[in-house]
């Protein structure tokens, strides 16, 4: 299925400030676009939440030819419970390793030229200590499965991925739509997959006319469809169509029509400034809320520092 391509993985984040620091300053990614929404997504892109939320796309380059991260922030939700479903994202960048060391970001050497670090929220990232490649530095996303054979059948026979490597001893399969895209690694953990509340979603693009066929095939094979074919609007941007599936272990999978998505996913040169602006406004609002609802007239500046972590510089 060469016409299908890997797009992004969705992470729920509870702290936009620390998360932005990790992706920008540690990994060295760029803010590709930032969008604010007043109500929950019809395809539950932001999870099972109905309120105000935001979406920030970050990556090493445009989503047309890079696998990126979608950071969803639900206002009022400060943390999520991790499960054992997401095993990590692997990327190649010696600069990211250097950045982590310089910023004293927790970093553990796993083996020669391979380091493990975590994004805020506990999401694992594996950093290969080599120069940035000429292609996309993001190499693979690793997900846990309870039955490797069943999962490989689902992703290959039903979704059209090819098996690139398979290690029966380690119970790992590496899959992808093409050799030059970010790969999907499935690892059998020998037990049930727990998605917690931090569960993510992996997204792929396909020609728009394949979407009804994907939905029909899943119905025929009695596989789970979380959201039937639906149109999603983004204020001031292209409307896209998606089908949301779940694999045998409940991993959420989004297929989106490629033609409209290429318009929607165009890099916004103002994206970085938009994110910084809403972070600043949210921080100011939080301080005002604390002052108005928590502090009594006699409250002092030392109390404010204790509650907010902000003081004189």
Image (cartoon, rainbow, N blue to C red):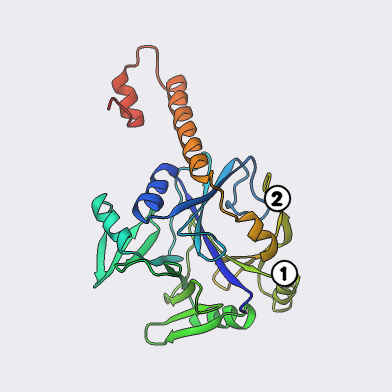
With 229 as the anchor, is 29 left or right in this view?
left
Q: Write the residue at 45% across / 44% down.
A: 16
- Report how many numbered discs are placed on residues in the image: 2
Q: Residues within 10 Å of mark 1 (few under 14, many from 20)?
A: many
Q: Write the residue at 53% across / 59% down.
A: 62
Q: Which residue is mark 2?
A: 233
Decide: is 286 above or below 122: above
For residue 157, which quarter of the picture? bottom right
For residue 91, which quarter of the picture? bottom left
Can the viewer see residue 226 in this picture? no
Q: Position of residue 106 (x, y in %)?
A: 27, 55
Q: Which residue is mark 1?
A: 211
Quadrant where the C terminus lies? Answer: top left
- Viewer-nearest residue: 176 or 74: 176
Dot 1: what SS?
helix
- Viewer-nearest residue: 294 or 142: 142
Q: Position of residue 270 (x, y in %)?
A: 54, 43
Q: Position of residue 171 (x, y in %)?
A: 41, 82
Quadrant where the N terminus lies? Answer: bottom right
Q: How far separated are the C-alphas under marks 2 and 1?
A: 17 Å
With 245 as the anchor, is 122 left or right in this view?
left
With 198 as the anchor, is 245 left or right in this view?
right
Q: Write the residue at 56% across / 53% down.
A: 267
Q: Position of residue 87 (x, y in %)?
A: 41, 67
Say whether disc 2 or disc 1 marks the residue closer to the N-terminus.
Answer: 1
Decide: is 123 above or below 158: above
Q: Are marks 2 and 1 in contact (CB under 8 Å)?
A: no
With 52 as the anchor, is 115 left or right in this view?
left
Residue 150: mark:
none
């Amino acid at each position: 299925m060469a016409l299908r391509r890997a797009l992004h993985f969705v992470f729920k984040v509870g702290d936009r400030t620390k998360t932005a620091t990790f992706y920008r300053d540690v990994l060295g990614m760029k803010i590709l676009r930032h969008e604010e929404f007043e109500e929950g997504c019809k395809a539950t892109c932001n999870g099972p939440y109905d309120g105000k939320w935001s979406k920030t796309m970050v990556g090493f380059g445009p989503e047309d030819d890079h696998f990126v991260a979608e950071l969803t922030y639900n206002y009022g939700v400060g943390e999520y419970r991790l499960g054992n479903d997401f095993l990590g994202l692997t990327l190649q960048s010696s600069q990211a390793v250097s950045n982590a060391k310089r910023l004293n970001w927790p970093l553990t050497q796993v083996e020669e030229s391979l380091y493990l670090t975590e994004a805020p929220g506990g999401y694992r990232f594996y950093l290969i200590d080599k120069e940035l490649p000429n292609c996309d530095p993001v190499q693979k996303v690793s997900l846990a499965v309870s039955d490797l054979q069943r999962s490989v059948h689902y992703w290959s026979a039903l979704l059209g991925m090819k098996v690139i490597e398979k290690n029966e001893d380690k119970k790992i399969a590496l899959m992808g739509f093409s050799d030059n895209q970010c790969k999907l690694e499935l690892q059998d953990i020998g037990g049930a997959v727990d998605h917690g509340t931090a569960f993510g979603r992996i997204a792929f693009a396909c020609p728009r006319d394949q979407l009804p066929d994907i939905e029909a095939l899943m119905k025929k094979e009695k596989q789970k469809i979380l959201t039937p074919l639906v149109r999603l609007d983004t204020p001031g941007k292209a409307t896209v169509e998606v089908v949301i599936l779940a694999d045998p272990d409940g991993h959420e999978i989004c297929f989106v029509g490629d033609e409209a998505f290429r318009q929607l996913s165009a890099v916004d040169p103002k994206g970085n400034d938009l994110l910084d602006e809403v972070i600043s406004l949210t921080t100011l609002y939080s301080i005002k809320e604390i002052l108005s609802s928590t502090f009594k007239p006699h409250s002092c500046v030392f109390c404010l520092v204790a509650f907010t972590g902000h003081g004189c510089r």
